[in-house]
Image (cartoon, rainbow, N blue to C red):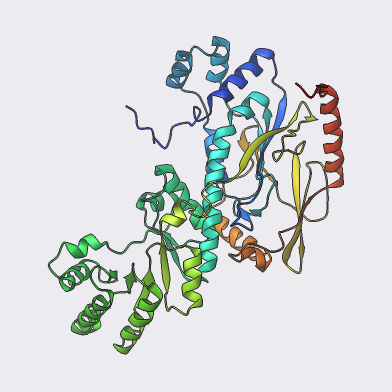
Amino acid sequence: MKNALNRGRSPALFADLYEFRMACSYQALGMNQSAVFSLFVRKLPQTRNYLLACGLHPFIDMLERLSFTGPDLEYLASLSEFPQSFLDWLANFKFSGDVYALPEGTPFFANEPILEIRAPIAEAQLLETLTMNQIGLSTLLASKAARVVSAASNRPVVDFGSRRAQGFDAALSGARAFFIAGVSATSNVEAAARFGLVPAGTMAHSYIEAFESETEAFESFLKTYPETILLVDTYDTIEGVRRVIDIAQKLGPNFKARGIRLDSGDLGKLAEQARAMLDQAGLTSVEIFASGGLDEHKIEALLKGGAPIDAFGVGTDLSVSGDSPSLDIAYKITEYTGIGRMKFSTGKATLPGAKQVFRTYREGKAASDVIAGAGEDLEGKPLLECVMRNGQRTKPASGLAEIRSHAQAEIASLPEHLVALEPAGMPYPVSISRALYDDEIACRARIEIANPRKAHSDGE
C-alpha cells in the first residue's frame, strides 16, 4: 500500500463525493461560468474574542499542484458514477481561478470572508472540503496558540503536543500555526525540519527510571548534554531539586545545566520552593520550565499568583484546542454568472456577491470592520488580497518569520478587551455596507419571486 502521507502527492481526491457529483452535473449541463465561493466562520466560539487567519500558503501550494493522477482516475471510474467525458475533464484539471484572502496572521470576526475563490463553478465546488479542512484547522490552532502566548506574558512557550495531536497532518500544521501565533519552539523534529522552526526538548521520566538513582540519571545525561534542562519530578520534586543542587556543587564551574522542569503537582508552590532553593545555592541563572496539563487559564493563574516560572511547555490542550475543538466554518457560493446567490436558512443565511472587508483604526487600535462588496472603496484598510490569479500565485509566499511579525503587530492592534482571555463584554463591531445591504435585499426579492411559497392548509 502506498504511503498515504506522501508529502508530494496531489490532494485531488480530498473532497466529498457530493462535490464530484455536483461538478459532474455542472459539466454535463454546460455550466462552466465563473462563480464566487466564500469561506467564513458563522459565529465565534464562546471562548474566542477573535480568530487568527492561518494556513493560506500551504493551501495555495496544494492548489498549484492539484491534479488527478492515473490511479485517482481509475478509482473514480471504478465507482461507476461518472461518464468518461467527466473523467477526461478531470484528467486535464488545473485550477484556473483567482483567490482573494486575508493575509496569514490577520485577526478576523464572524461572517467576515477569510478567503474567496473565484473560478469556474465546477473547479470551485471541488475545493470545498480541502479549503475548509486546511484553512479551518490552521486557523483554529493559531487562534488557540495566540491565547496561550498572550497568557504567558512574553515568556517562551514550547509546543509539546504532537504526540496527542489528532493525526500526523494536524501535528505538523499545528506546529506551523503555533509559530505564527507566537510559540517559540516545537518538540517535533519533522515540523522543525519542514518549516525551519526551533526544535526543543528536555528528557522524559523513562530516562530517569532507566537508572538505579535519580542522581546517576542526571549526571549521565549532563555528560551527553551539559546545557540541558533536567526533569525533577519523577519521584519527589523537591528532592529532585536538591539532587540538582548537589550535582552543581560537585561540578562547580563545569555545571552548565540551563534549567529544571516541573511537570506535575502544584506548579506554583513548587516553582516558588525550587526558585528559593536554587537562588540560595547561587544558581540564579538556572531557569524553571513548567509543563503538565497546562492551558492559557492555568498559565495566567500561575503568573498572576507570582509563580517564578521562566517558560512553559504546552501539549494536549494546545494541539487539540481543548476548550474549542471546532469552528462553525462554512464554504458557500455567493455569486454565479455575475449574479448574487444566497442561502436563507435560519442561522445559516449568507451574503451575496464577492466581497471586501475594510478595517478602520483609532489611535493605532482596530476600531471597526465593514463587510462590503468587492467593488466598493470605503474608508479603512482593505483586508482581502489577491493571492492567486488565473491559477498562479501573484507573489512569492511570505516567510514564516514575516508572517509571525505580521500576526504580532495585528494582535497588538486589537483592543485590549479582545486579547484578554475572558469573553469580551463588548464584541468587536462588524457591519455590512449600505451597498451590500441593498444587494442582499434585491437578491432576496429575486429569489423569492423565483421560488414562491406554496399556500397550504392547516391540515397539510
Q: Nearer the viewer, residue 321 or 374?
A: 321
Q: How many marks?
A: 0
Question: What percent of the width, then of the height, locates residue 184?
Answer: 46, 63
> Looking at the image, is 420 positioned above or below residue 72?
below
> Looking at the image, is 459 positioned above or below residue 286?
above
Task: Look at 20% across and 79% down and name the residue there.
Answer: 247
Question: On the rendered structure, is 275 left or right of 415?
Answer: left
Question: On the rendered structure, is 247 left or right of 421?
Answer: left
Residue 57 visible, this angle: no
Question: What percent of the width, then of the height, locates residue 458?
Answer: 79, 24
Q: Nearer the viewer, residue 384 or 149?
A: 149
Q: Residue furthest front?
A: 459
The part of the image, by quadrant, that contains residue 187 is: bottom left
Residue 340 visible, this angle: yes
Location of the N terminus by quadrant is: top left
Question: What percent of the width, then of the height, locates residue 367?
Answer: 75, 62
Question: What percent of the width, then of the height, locates residue 196?
Answer: 43, 54
Task: Look at 40% across and 50% down and name the residue there.
Answer: 191
Question: On the rendered structure, is 163 left or right of 376?
Answer: left
Q: Residue furthest left?
A: 212
Location of the C terminus by quadrant is: top right
Q: Nearer the viewer, residue 198 or 318?
A: 318
